[in-house]
Image (cartoon, helix red, strand yellow):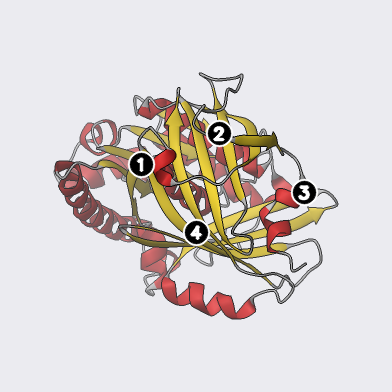
Amino acid sequence: MWVFAITGGPCSGKTSGLAYLEEKLTARGYKVLIVPESATKLISGGILPWEMATSQFQRGILVDTLAVEQVFFEAARYYRNHGKKVIVLCDRGTKDGEAYMGKDPYARLLKSFDYSENELCDQRYHAVFHLRTAAIGAEKFFTLENNKARKETLEEARALDERTLEAWQRHPHPRVIDNSTDFAGKMHRLFAEISAVLGDPVPLEIEDKFLILKIRPEDIIVPFHTAHIIQNYLVSPQKGDEYRVRARSDGEGTTYFYTVKTEIEPGVRAEKERLVDSREYHSLLSLRDPECVEIRKKRISFFWRDQYYEVDLFESPDPTLTLMEAERTDRNSSLQTPPFIPVIRNVTGSKEYSNKEIARKK
């Protein structure tokens, strides 16, 4: 059972990061539990920080965080005791409040709950992952439109990011995910850091795609995870943007994703992905792009020789199509495909085998 705090400054990609991690880690066989952020929940419910003393608001956040995390920790222990590999991802953690109150006042708040900093920081989370705000190094992507609970300016976001990082610096395993790459690279580095902590093969930013002959799940001679995926592209309000929804189901339920790729400038797109509930997912389906058809496929994911593979067996629109993707790791910089997979050819970079092109009506 692993517990990670995912934190950072405003507009850092935390929401997209949690959705990205949920999908990636589930595919690797983990049961992923996501603890919702307390501050957004309180603000959405009408408890507004600008209408009360900071100490009062942060006290409310701490009460809620401790209670909700406890529920998730108990659920995680249940799953672990029933043979699951469990990861709890906390959308922020118990030390974030220090960035708003200051070190000494927050230490007094913790003491009033009979907790020490060691208990609520060092001992509570196995690692802390701090995503830098876009206000530091990716200024043109800085926006608060995705979170109505935030009101910081560019300078305020930078200062808050630094204070948040400082609040967590006592933790024995902090990790900083900066904006030195594009957003896709940032998400990749977050996943790579978590993979390293877990002791899993660390993915490199190299992905290969292969056209393969159709196989059966029983042809996979190593342990694997199976999921069913339904993907639909939506009408985009602006040319160059891409909107899509995806439902991923396995034996334990269905998870829904909403992804928006926005063109910032020619050749540069920002990607935002978040988890949505069933109701919002089905509402978004009313915006389906009439020029695209629905994609349905079975995904089989597995490790072979420390290399992670995903095999997509398409059910529609082309049931004869089967693709395999390999995300290279630090243990396999050169790729050898599994001998039990009948590869036809390498189609890496071929537009006709992209999901958007497969969905496009011919």
User: Residue drawn at (43%, 26%), measured in percent from left and top?
Assistant: 196
Q: What amino acid is labelled 3 in the image?
A: Lys
Name the residue: 39% across, 75% down.
Answer: 46
Amino acid at circle 4: Ile
Q: Mark 1 to mark 4: distance in Å?
A: 16 Å
Confirm whether residue 100 shows in the render: no
Task: Choose the circle earlier in sequence order: 2 or 1.
Answer: 1
Looking at the rendered structure, which numbered label has been put on residue 29?
1
To which residue does mark 2 refer? 189
- Kindly indicate whether the residue at mark 2 contacts the one at mark 4 (C-beta within 8 angstroms): no
- Please name the residue that numbered disc 3 is placed on: 351
Q: CA distance from mark 1 to mark 3?
A: 30 Å
| N-terminal-most mark, 3 or 4 | 4
| The one of 298 and 3 positioned closer to us in this rendering | 298
Where disc 4 sits, the SS reads: strand
Q: Amino acid at mark 2?
A: Arg
Q: Look at the numbered disc 2 and give the secondary structure of its residue.
A: helix
> Quadrant location of residue 325?
top right
